[in-house]
Image (cartoon, rainbow, N blue to C red):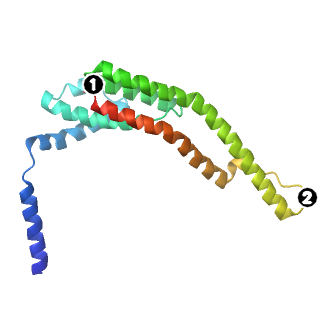
Amino acid sequence: MDEMKSAFERAMERAESLGKASDEDMKKWKYTPEGEKLAALYLREECDLTTELNKFDDKMRKYVIEGAQEVFIRNIDLPKNDFAKKKNKKVMEAIKELKRDKVGIENVYTKMRRVFSHYEREGEQQRKQTYEALRMDFEAKLRQAAQQQAGIGSSPPKINVEMHPQFQQEWRRIMAQLDSQYLRLLDEYKKEILSIR
């Protein structure tokens, strides 16, 4: 028991040596989550971002903006469908509203839009070609395996390759690999956005 007590006492001493949280830390801990909530409400179209931000004084607003910005940046994604495109547009407008350096943010957005455009055009073609090659390869392997099991001379059963779990798993793996190059660029641009005031 004495050992536990002394370990507890040592922990308390270490905590005391770290000191009390500063006023800045306290404000950050209180108002950053407020910004996160505000961003969530904005994304659900339940509030006006500017109106809500103006309810905070300057000292608190910077933390609210920090929290909102984090949520907005996490919501930027590849334009895989119309919903993602609309969300990207909405989020990018919101981030721009939060930033003072409009030119700097627009420069990053130009690079992001190029990535989005490439993903939709060339990336789509690459995905289609890769999908077709995988489907044909998988179909040939399944047909060969079915013929070996059924014996020579019998016709192989019709197989919907695209519904096969192994095909779907392999396709998801390849898609993740194809998307990763775009996601790396997006992550770089997200970091740039964070550095812009």
Mark 2: which amino acid?
A: Ser
Asked whether residue 160 appears in the rendered view, the answer is no
Residue at screen point 82% across, 64% down: 149
Residue at screen point 12% across, 66% down: 11
Residue at screen point 15% across, 33% down: 60
Which image quadrant: the N terminus? bottom left
Picture quarter containing residue 88?
top left
Q: Which mark is residue 154?
A: 2
Residue at screen point 24% across, 32% down: 65
Return the x and y of residue 162 as percentages of the image width and height. 69, 47
Question: Dot 1 corresponds to which residue?
Answer: 99
Q: Is residue 147 above or below residue 122?
A: below
Closer to the camera, 49 or 19? 19
Circle nearer the N terminus (1, 2):
1
- How dense is the environment of label 1, judged by Cα within 10 Å: few (below 14), some, or many (20 and up)? some
Return the x and y of residue 186 as percentages of the image width and height. 42, 35
Badge 2 marks a residue whose secondary structure is: loop
Return the x and y of residue 192 as percentages of the image width and height. 33, 31
Please state the total of marks drawn on the protein image: 2
Does 146 sit left or right of 130 as displayed? right
Mark 1: which amino acid?
A: Lys
Does 157 sit left or right of 101 as displayed? right
